[in-house]
Structures are given as structure tokens and as C-alpha cells.
Image: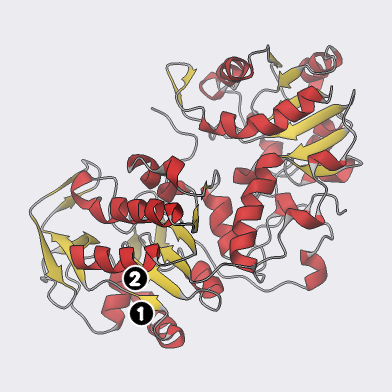
Amino acid sequence: MRRGVSPLRCRGPGGPLEWPGRRCRHVVQKPRMADLLGSDPPLSTPARPLVKPGPMSTQRKLFVEDIQTAGKRVIVRVDFNVPLKDGKVESDKRLKESLPTIKYLKEKGAKVILMSHLGRPDGKRNPDFSLRPVADALAALLGSPVSFADDCVGAPAESAVAALKGGDVLLLENLRFHAQEEANDPGFAKQLAALADVYVNDAFGSAHRAHASTEGITKFVPQAASGYLMKKELDYLGGALAEPKRPFVAIIGGSKVSGKIDVIKNLLPNVDKLLIGGGMTYTFLKAQGLEIGKSIVENDKLDLAKSLLAEAGDKIVLGTDVVVTDKLDFKARTVGATKVVSIKDIPSDWEGVDAGPDTIEAFRKIIIGAKTVIWNGPVGVFEIDASAKGTIAVAEALAEATASGATTIIGGGDSASAVKKAGVASKVSHVSTGGGASLEYLEGKVLPGVAALTNK
């Protein structure tokens, strides 16, 4: 199976700091409030400011229902970055998430033009990354034809758009076959805009990228509105951060503290409890002077961990026991011998790979007692069954909390994969479609794809 997004590796001062599939994030400067609330961001925003929870909401922006679309050419940025296998769509979850916006526009008699990226073709045409199979899968879901243009700009796109009638749907070829897309090239953005009368962004998963199809295009269209998926994502995340029902609990996992610094700092003032799991646990344990054996650690973040613990008081909850192994082979998805030990008794030649049973039970009690829960990041190496019990237990506790009336939000990425693996994806309030976008939203950063939408 080939997926559209590959894992990233980060390096620290002392060498590589790796746990496959985790991302590295960095702290940047705060913005002016005017920048946050609607002024156009620059064409390229490689580092975005931190903001307080709440303002990045669609309430201030045009929504697809606010604009006249009947008979108009409406170009919609969707997130069809789906896994393909043997030339067919292997998972249509993202296609299904886009259906409300597409169906609404069809019913209104709009000429619907869909554009998306798929994978990383590096600015070159590559048949392995063609969206043509996606058009067929979407047509099956809609129960009506979806035409396909062999390019996203130029004559193939222009002629395909010209042939559209009200209610028709067209999918353009992969945006990233052109390097100008990720470069946010104004000329390329203008070409995309020329295909339409109105722009709708329904690709939350790409909202954190200032690309031609998410940010640049908005400078060349009279109206830019959010779609149903974009609104749903921001309503859930924004509502949780701005006006959470309490107790408000956040569960932050993953391999490295550096990958979640901004999330922790942004959430700490607002949450009642912040549960920390996964590989980053061991940096916090070592910061307290405990032996962590061969467990993953960021030695250059020990002082930061100490300061976070001091600042948080009893808000931060670490486990009391862990599952350790004498051998972890992530590539082969295997572990050697395992045992449960107290966080005070980790052997010097073993490494932690999962939360222990006492930790799981402590986390569960806090989760099921909450009214709002946000989860981002696994609490163990969940890709391996032997070290997935903690993560699965968290997922099950979230489902239990949801059944008791809590609002539970899964921040995409590995957390979304975990609730799916646990079989509870349909039993939580919301599973985000955008791992990177939801993470940056939780960090409090401006999302260019949202900031660029037209203000009401």
C-alpha cells in the first residue's frame, strides 16, 4: 500500500531523534490580533504565529450556504490525498467526508470543480499519483458521473470546465504535478481562479499549508468560503478550546516533547488535566532524575520538561508504571521480552514501549470523568500489537466517555488510526481528517487556508 504522506525524521544537536511517523514542530512568534482576525496573510508563511484558542473559527468567515452558487462555476479545494492500491482507492473515508459540500452544490445547480493533491510527486507528472481512480470512486459514492480533466490548469482543465452544466461534477488532475502549487506561485493561483466564479475550501487537512490552491487562489476570486467539512472541523476544535465543558482533559502522546511543545503550552492554561504518554514520557521521567534505560529521550529538552512540570502543578499526569522490552525492532514490528515495571524501576538496558496497567486505569478514570476530551498522539508504540494496549485502552475510554455525554475529539494522524484499530471510530464525537492541521490548530497557530477565506 502507498500512502500520500511519508513519515518525517528530525535531528537533535546530538544526532537523530527518531520514532517513525512522528513530526517535528517549532516555536515561532506571536501575531498582531489584526493579522489573526482576517487580514490577508502573505503569499508564503513558512512560520506561523501562535494565537490564543478560539479566533480561528469559521463564524467570522463566509460559509458555502452564505453565497449564491446556482449556475456558477464553483471550484472546491478538497482533501483527496487517499491511499491507492493496484490503481484503486483503498480507503474512501476522505471522499465520504467531502460529500456534504459536493451534494449541496450539486443540488443548488452549481458547476462543481474539485481540486486536490495526492502524495508527493515533487512537481512532476507521475501516473502513480494520478487522481483518475479517485474520480471513479467518487462517482460510485455520488451515484452520478464525475468527469476528469487530465490537468488542473491549461487547455485540458479549461475545456472540461466549459463543458460543465449545472449540477455536474469535475475532478481536476493532481495539483502537485505542478511545483508552483506548493510554492504558492501567484501565476498558478491565478490560473486556478480563472476556472471559477467562486472558491470553497473544504480541505481542512491542507488548511495549515499556504499553497496556491489553499491560500493564493483567494486573492483572485471575489468570494472564498468554507465548506461543510472545514466548518465541522473548526467548530469541534474551536468549541473545545474556546468554551469547553468541564472537566476538560487533553491526552498528548507521541515520541518527542519537541513535537508537542506548542500544544502543551497552548493547552495548559485551559485544561483541567493533561495526560502525557508515549515516548515523550521518558523525557519527563528523566527530568525528574529517574532511570529510563534505553527509552527514547530528548536530553536537550530536560530543562523544558522540568519547567513544564513546575508550571503545570498537578495538571500534568504521568504514568506510574510502564511496559518495557529488551528489544524493539520497529521496522519489523516486533518486540522482544516484555514486562511491567514501576517508573522508578526501569532497567538500564530495557526501553519503555507502552503504558502499564496502573497507568491505563488512572488515565481511564480521568477520561471517563471528563466532559471534554482532546486526544493527540498514541501512548505507546501502537503499531505493534504487543505495545498497543495502552493506546487501545485510551480509545476505548474515550468511547465510554462519549456514551456518558462527553465531547471527545480525536486529533487526526496516529490518534485517528488508533481509534480505527480499536474499532471505536464511530463511538467518539469527532475524528479529525487532518493530522497536521489539527495539531497546528491545537498549537494555537494561524491556519492560512482559514485566514484567507472571505470575512462576513
**What's the amino acid at mark 1?**
Leu
**What's the amino acid at mark 2?**
Glu
Residue 264: where, in percent of width, then height?
Answer: 48, 71
- Residue 302, numbered label: 1
Residue at the image point whose x is 40% and y is 67% from the top: 369
- Viewer-nearest residue: 91 or 233: 233
Residue at the image point whose x is 19% and y is 70% from the top: 321
Residue 402: where, in percent of width, then height?
Answer: 45, 53
Is the C-beta separation of discs 1 and 2 under 8 Å? Answer: yes
Left or right, 264 with reference to 66: left
Residue 253: name its quadrant. bottom left
Confirm whether residue 165 shows in the render.
yes
Residue at the image point whose x is 66% and y is 63% from the top: 48
Residue 112: where, in percent of width, then height?
Answer: 78, 24
Q: Residues within 10 Å of mark 2 (few under 14, many from 20)?
A: many
Residue 404: name its quadrant. bottom left
In the picture shown, does residue 1 fall above or below 243? above
- Residue 406, numbered label: none
In the picture shown, does residue 141 fall above or below 78? above
- Residue 298, numbered label: 2
In the picture shown, does residue 443 fall above or below 132? below
| Secondary element type, mark 2 | loop
In the displayed orientation, state which residue is furthest to the left: 337
- Viewer-nearest residue: 379 or 288: 379
Q: Which quarter of the rendered picture does the N terminus lie within?
A: top left
| Secondary element type, mark 1 | helix
Left or right, 116 with reference to 355: right
Residue 113: where, in percent of width, then height?
Answer: 76, 25
Confirm whether residue 208 shows in the render.
no
- Viewer-nearest residue: 338 or 347: 338
Left or right, 310 with reference to 339: right
